Image (tube, coloured by chain):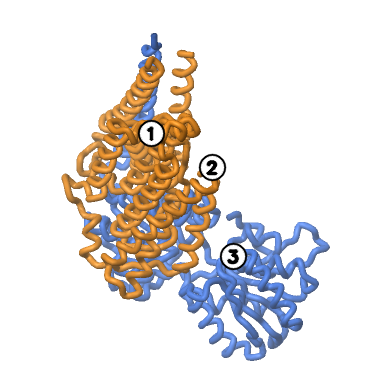
Chain colours: A orange, B blue
Amino acid sequence: MSLWRRIRAMEFWHELLLVGLLAGLLAGAWYFEQARDAEFVSWETQANLSSHMWEMALLTIPLTLIIITGGIDLSVGATMSLSAVTMGLAWRGGVGVWPAVGLALAVGLAAGSLNGAMVVFFRVHPLIITLATMSAYRGVAEGLIGAEPVSGFPAGFEALAEPLVAGVPPAGVLFVVLAAAAWVLLGRTAIGRELRAIGYNETAARFSGVAVARTKLLLYATSGLVAAVAAVLFVARRDTAKADVGAGLELAAITAVVLGGASIFGGRGRILGTVLGVLLLHEVRSLVAWRWNRDELTFIIVGALLILSVLVHSVLTRRKS
Amino acid sequence: MYRWPRVLLVTASLVSIALSGCERPKDEQAQEDSDSGSAKTLRICFLPKKKGSPYFTSCAAGAKRAAEELGNVELIYDGPTDGSAAKAADMVDSWALQKGDVICVSASNPTVQARAMLKAADKGVRVITWDADTPAEARDFFVNQATEQEIGYALVDALARDIGGQPPVGEVAIVAADPSAANQNAWMKHMKVRLAEKYPRLNLVVVKFPGEDQKKAQQQTRDLLAAYPNLKGIWGISSVSFPAAAEAVLQSPWAGKVYVTGLSTPNVMKKYVVPADSSQPAVVKSVVLWSTEDLGYLTIRAAAALAQGTLKKGDKTFDAGRLGTKQIVGDNILLGKILVFTKDNIEDFDF
């Protein structure tokens, strides 16, 4: 019991640190940006800029659960690309826009299920499996669509990217719902405990009656489906289906989850931490682009934040042992 | 039990770092405001396809020169260092929210960026494209480095000169990229016209489409050399196929007998034009491009004029400062200055 409490406490401090950084960042921006015409810390700016993060944010929720089981999914960006291309080609081929969305979701679910099946049956680390499918899915997407992006989707579909609640598009609402569901699942149900059990010790979990294979299959399938949803939302937002949709988002999502305090070795991780990680990553990127216009600086700061996040953990863990 | 005070200390120090990080730019801002005096400072954002690439860095150098000459321009140069089209569109969004005066876009994925540009226009920001265009409804003007005809003709003239002879005689071939690339197809159309009109004894035997793939382009060039042993010259008309074709010729027994030309930046092609080992033959005599610095310069000049109302839709000419008067065809402002790099001048350029 004391082990559990210690971990809880550590995560508490980690999350407090993230809140502190976030608050510091926004307070600093608010204080020093007042002289400018448009303010960074205003609801309008923040709601507008938030549209840049929702797709990545959606990916982090299933990814957090997967990372808690000691796995990883590197293929989410490529799955987005495959789903977007499927949707674009289906729509260009004369299928209605909503059936095309259905097809994209089906392809995402299939791609995720294939990941899950291979992880379960081959018993190879998911890093290898999803590294392979990342390359394969993107290759298929590139091959299918060629150089010409699909564009000019109907207005009814593009309404998906319009503000819904307080300037925030449906993607943001979906993220809140998904995060809440995952939070309940992880913290309030037996499944949540099983996920952590798999992450701590898979063999022990299997002997204690956890349906490891089924759980993993479901997790990777969900991850694929969520990636497809993210892809559809991106297509609606930028009116473009092409193979570069979702490029690099897998790394951004993993960064956010790890920044949020999840351990890449499994067992440890919380939804609240991930949400804070997503927000901090987004705010850092937005503020650097807003104020300094130096894309290279973004990479440096994100790297420094990640190292800091790991450092805090290692300091805290060492103190107690 | 826990050393939480230390954690708080770390947090506090980080917050203060974050705060102090924000401080400096405000001073700069204040300074800019007082420096510019009464004249309205124009905020012009200049977006490349990929920040940090030699081509775009040299475009930015020209843009900076124009901003300095004009004096009342705050030039913002940023772009995705990884070439991500989505991130480029995010930057356009961010600049539009800051209510800049003009945003100048080189579009890596025209439809992705067009969407962000239309939103920026809704917010009252003027948008132009340069280097790579988007659909016309998303921008006011396109600063066009060279027309398709100029590029096509320049490519043919360069290779004809390299092959030499009065008139130049022999078999020639094209290594293109994707068969669907609209700009390359247009260049080839004009190349064929020029060949027929001016060089009837240069015989175009084949066009290869290896895609934007360096290995395939090399392989197909080797096949080409084997299949047409009397070949005199090859055009590599994409930035990938040109160096690949040059490399394939260099490694073959035809080096020094077959000349390659095409579109590329000087640094990439230097080693083929001026071989480091002087016993090696130069497989490339001319590299065709436009002046990238002038392209950046013209873009900022046009952006400033658009914001001040001296450049309007329907204008036929544009006074581009140091570059003199430039033609406007439709909504395309033409740089119209093809630059050919040869062994005599290629060392003078560094991009």
Rate crowding at label 1 as few (under 14), some (14 to 19) or many (20 or more) other CA atoms within 10 Å. many
| Label 1 chain ID | A
Alpha carbon distance from label 3 to label 2 = 32 Å
Q: Amino acid at mark 1?
A: Glu
Provide residue A280's location: percent of width, then percent of height: 35, 35
Q: Quadrant of the C terminus of chain B?
A: bottom right
Residue nearest the observer in this picture, A302 or A88: A88
**Mark 1 element type:** helix
Q: Amino acid at mark 3?
A: Asp
Alpha carbon distance from label 1 to label 3 = 47 Å
Q: Is residue B169 above or below residue A265?
A: below
Residue nearest the observer in this picture, A71 or B187: A71
Q: Residue at x 48, y 56 (%)?
A: B59
**Mark 3 element type:** loop
Q: Residue at x 47, y 47 (%)?
A: A74
The residue that disc 2 covers is A125
Residue nearest the observer in this picture, B277 or B28: B277
Residue nearest the observer in this picture, A100 or A44: A100
The residue that disc 1 covers is A194
Asked if residue B288 lies left or right of residue A140, the reply is: right
Q: Answer yes or no: is residue B293 visible.
A: no
Rate crowding at label 2 as few (under 14), some (14 to 19) or many (20 or more) other CA atoms within 10 Å. some
Task: Give the total number of marks visible in the rendering.
Answer: 3
Provide residue B297's location: percent of width, then percent of height: 44, 58
Rate crowding at label 3 as few (under 14), some (14 to 19) or many (20 or more) other CA atoms within 10 Å. some
Provide residue A186's location: percent of width, then percent of height: 32, 34
Between label 3 and label 2, give the one nearer the viewer.
2
Q: Residue at x 59, y 86 (%)?
A: B195
The residue that disc 3 covers is B213
Q: In this rendering, do the residues under marks 1 and 2 share a single chain? A: yes
Q: Earlier in the sequence, mark 1 or mark 2?
A: 2
Between label 1 and label 3, give the one nearer the viewer.
1
